[in-house]
Amino acid sequence: MSKINIWNPHFETMQRDDMRKVQGESLRDVVKRVYFNVPYYRDKMQSAGLNPEDINSVDDLKNLPFTTKQDLRDNYPFGLFAIPMSEIIRLHASSGTTGRPTVVGYSRRDIGIWSEVMARTFTGAGVGKDDFIQIAYGYGLFTGGLGAHYGGEMVGASVIPISGGNTRRQLQLMHDFGSTVLACTPSYASYLAEAIAEGDIKREALKLKVGVFGAEPWTENMRKEIEKNLKIKAMDIYGLSEIIGPGVSFECQYQCGLHINEDHFIPEIIDPDTLEPLPEGELGELVFTTVTKEGLPIIRYRTRDLTRLNYEKCACGRTLVRMNKCTGRSDDMLIIRGVNLFPSQIESVLLEMDETTPHYLLVVERKNNLDRLELHLEVEDHFYSDRISELQVLRMKIQSQIESTIGLSVSVKLVEPKTIERSEGKSKRVIDKRELK
């Protein structure tokens, strides 16, 4: 293990009791600000019989109302902002593919917080002023590119704002500039690894040492695959534009959970059905309250992501609470014939098999009032070119292993390499045709 660097030791190694005091003071402040400046929150608190004076510590957090993505859409575009628009210096927004986009606004201080938490993120990955960070997250209304950009500049690294796409150019500049850090989605990292293996620029000619990957869920098996193929250390990061963007939490070099920047974002775990807080270590839905943001402070935001929290001190020296890799989402979970299924369960099985690639697509249909699950899966080239009988044996093997894992029957369709559409951003793993009827 290389030397462990910590960007902000004061907060990142703060004792638990001291952190709770800091959080309590910040929580009292933000509750007052939203009560007096955001009509939506004032109405919600009054309906619950709450006044700002009722919130005195983190223990009172559970009494506050939740906020959902729909609340942001209902207050589109600026209804949840807590400061005048004259003090908002940046606007970002989601794509809006499932309704109105969610709009987020930043004050100058918010941009500073964003830079700070991303500096902690890069430092946690072992990145410093001697590194070259190739940022292949998208720039624009999506928060990924610019958030990583700020953090990279704050730690003093040389930032290459190449954005997403144009893979040939990505690899050329990666080689010519001597990029040591890659920041992008894990799906695109896999795509780049594939392009390197098939291209003219060999991996040995690159200086890559670490990847900082986020913006979509990915499994431990996918991490191992990326680390093996790119010959780097693959670090997980987590963020939501509604909370700040990337930088909400990050892995250190021990890769044993993501450290939440909890002096800025207070986490809770709730039961997604009862909405009651769960004890430490229990699996549930992650909820955040932003306590330092000025432009768009959010109270008890339901992320829909499922995880656990661990408050033990990490071997790296940080005392920040850690969250596990998210196992799925409480709202994109597939329910097929009464069985709950997350795509990550399928991926975990596939990545343990030598014959398959990480490229797959789940298709859900309803025929004769019965849900049907079909897996389209690419297999390695030399397997696909084998005899039909051998492919049939492989198909049955894959089908058996998946069915024993998920407890559902699945139809497996093996397809030739390169036939499933590649993504240079977030990958699309599921087509649910039931929604079209």
Image (tube, rainbow, N blue to C red):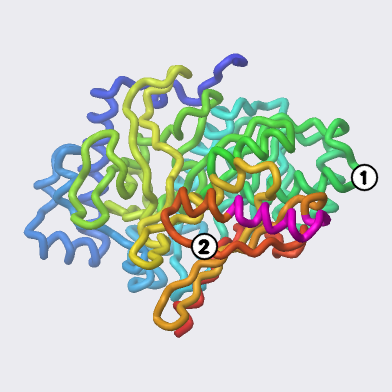
Nearest to viewer (mark 1 / mark 2): 2
Q: Quadrant of residue 175?
A: top right
Q: Residue at x 28, y 59 (%)?
A: 67
Q: Residue at x 14, y 45 (%)?
A: 55
Q: What is the quadrant of the C terminus in the image?
A: bottom left
Q: Residue furthest front?
A: 389
Q: CA distance from mark 1 to mark 2?
A: 39 Å
Q: Say what amino acid the circle numbered 1 marks.
A: Asp
- Label 1: how many residues lie within 10 Å, few (<14), some (14-19) or many (20+)? few
Q: Residue furthest right?
A: 200
In the displayed structure, 193 sits above or below 280; it is below
Q: Contact (CB < 8 A) between labels 1 and 2?
A: no
- Badge 1 marks a residue whose secondary structure is loop
Q: Residue at x 37, y 43 (%)?
A: 307
Magenta-colored span: 384-398
Q: Say what amino acid the circle numbered 2 marks.
A: Val
- Label 2: how many residues lie within 10 Å, few (<14), some (14-19) or many (20+)? some
Disc 1: which residue: 200
* Position of residue 201 measured from the top left corner of the image (x, y, whole percent): 89, 41
* Position of residue 291 measured from the top left corner of the image (x, y, whole percent): 31, 44
In the displayed structure, 125 sits above or below 369; it is above
Q: Residue at x 55, y 46 (%)?
A: 349
Q: Quadrant of residue 182?
A: top right
Instruction: Name the foreground residue: 217 vs 404.
Output: 404
Disc 2: which residue: 410
Query: Residue 53 lies in magenta, yes or no?
Result: no
Q: Main secondary structure of the magenta part?
A: helix
Who comes first in sequence, dot 1 or dot 2?
A: 1
Direction from residue 361 to residue 66 in the image, left or right: left
Q: Note whether residue 87 is visible.
A: no
